[in-house]
């Protein structure tokens, strides 16, 4: 299989496709995480409706960082045989998957659940991809939580 | 020397430009570049990558470097609470 | 979506299909576990090659027990919004998925990973499905570990 | 009374039949049925379901019940170690 394991794409993501990318003769368990676009988000004062999302990425660095997460997983869970991370860029509609992460191991107790969870947490820390939320009355670029060790803000930066 | 500056998402919007080539004295750092070209971003939280690797304010730049200004990542899925 | 959430089938399983079965407007995270047919299994003395598997089930009871696992998950992880379990019967080739379990939650910390893992463990305890391993030189019906509370063997039963 | 007996996988193979209708005295239990119809399975580990619910040796049977003999489950995925 020559498909890339770490890829940003404008095309719809497929869980069957990512399963094929990581499936191996010697693996019996694959855990896949799908992040999908929520249409409604509960807030303090009722639900807020999202119309659609737009994702922007620093593509070459994002693919490099996704591959780094794969390498980190191999270090931490040496029984893992396959990792793939696919992320959408461009416009994503409600209920569409925006990110897929698949981890294959010989058996289900070999770390596939833990490694998949680790990958989604790390993705939100180090992979340069940003989401723009679009509502009926406007849009905003969402910024994630600050990673203090990466912050290059000036000393004027207010503490968070 | 010249470095390539690129901005993304909300930083691009705030700075009002997507990319630029900036001339700097030799041995300039990331901090020097930021002070010279995007002083208006002083109050924002962001990260910097030099040639696709995370860098710090005191990272020394070289001719031809690509310097990317990165807002805190919001890819993956929506946050667990707001 | 009128597709069944708990189903035995002779048709190939699709991860895209199960994602559609559990996707909801208010969910942002779906974890899917795929059990796939391993072609080689490491044993004490080298690898053993499997040619293919055949699954047999007590179909109505198996679907009922899978739905029961879904209900158990709702009790334990009340934030879970959707659970689907699909299992193959009949002949399955190497690398094919034989079971898919998908769990959808509003956010990734709402129990989707834990509930998915719970489901595969419970499936192996209470869902009446059996696997026949086929090698080049024979076949055998595999029996899982004994659940003492279910065992109706006579007192002659040797201890396990 | 009559009950329907069905067997699966390795038990079906060992017993040599897939299903049968068995006549029993009123108030017979699962154990009575097993002793009468499948004494040759005495040394095997298995479970019993009556009308698709797990039952025990002392579960009392009724006319028309479906009694299934179930080897220990091996669905799902392959074991984590052999």
Image (spheres, coloured by chain):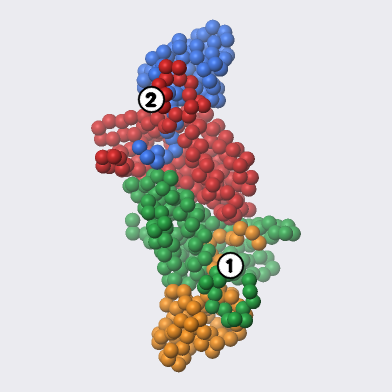
Chain colours: A green, B orange, C red, D blue
Residue under the image location 58 percent in, 58 percent down? A37
Q: Residue D10 carries which label?
A: 2
Kind of element beneath mark 2: helix
Give residue B39's quadrant in the image: bottom right
Q: Is residue A109 above or below residue D67?
A: below
Q: Position of residue C103 (x, y in %)?
A: 55, 47
Give residue A17's quadrant in the image: bottom left
Residue D10 in sight here: yes
Q: Mark 1 lies on which chain?
A: A
Q: How crowded is mark 1: few (under 14 residues within 10 Å), some or many (20 or more)?
A: some
Q: Where is residue A144 in the image (x, y as percent from the top left)?
A: 58, 67
Q: In which quarter of the image is the N terminus of chain C?
A: top right
Residue on which disc 1 sits: A144
Q: Are marks 1 and 2 on the same chain?
A: no
Q: In this view, does D56 lie above or below B45?
A: above
Give residue C67's quadrant in the image: top right
- In the picture as drawn, the residue positioned furthest to the front comes out as C159
């Amino acid at each position: 299989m020559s498909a890339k394991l770490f890829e940003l794409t404008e095309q719809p993501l497929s869980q069957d496709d990512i399963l094929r990318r990581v499936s191996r003769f010697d693996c019996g368990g694959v855990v896949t995480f799908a992040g999908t676009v929520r249409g409604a988000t509960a807030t303090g004062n009722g639900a807020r409706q999202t119309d659609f999302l737009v994702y922007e990425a620093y593509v070459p660095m994002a693919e490099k960082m996704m591959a780094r997460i794969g390498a980190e997983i191999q270090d931490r869970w040496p029984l893992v045989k396959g990792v793939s991370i696919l992320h959408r860029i461009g416009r994503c509609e409600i209920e569409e998957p925006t990110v897929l992460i698949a981890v294959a191991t010989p058996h289900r107790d070999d770390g596939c659940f833990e490694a998949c969870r680790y990958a989604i947490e790390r993705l939100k820390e180090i992979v340069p991809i940003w989401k723009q939320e679009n509502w009926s009355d406007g849009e905003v670029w969402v910024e994630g939580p600050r990673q203090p060790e990466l912050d290059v803000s000036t000393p004027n930066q207010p503490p968070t | 020397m010249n470095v390539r500056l690129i901005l993304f998402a909300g930083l691009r919007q705030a700075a009002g430009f997507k990319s630029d080539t900036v001339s700097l004295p030799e041995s300039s750092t990331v901090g020097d570049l930021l002070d010279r070209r995007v002083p208006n971003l002083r109050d924002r939280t962001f990260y910097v990558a030099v040639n696709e690797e995370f860098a710090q304010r005191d990272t020394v730049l070289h001719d031809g470097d690509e310097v990317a200004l990165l807002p805190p990542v919001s890819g993956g899925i929506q946050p667990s609470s707001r």
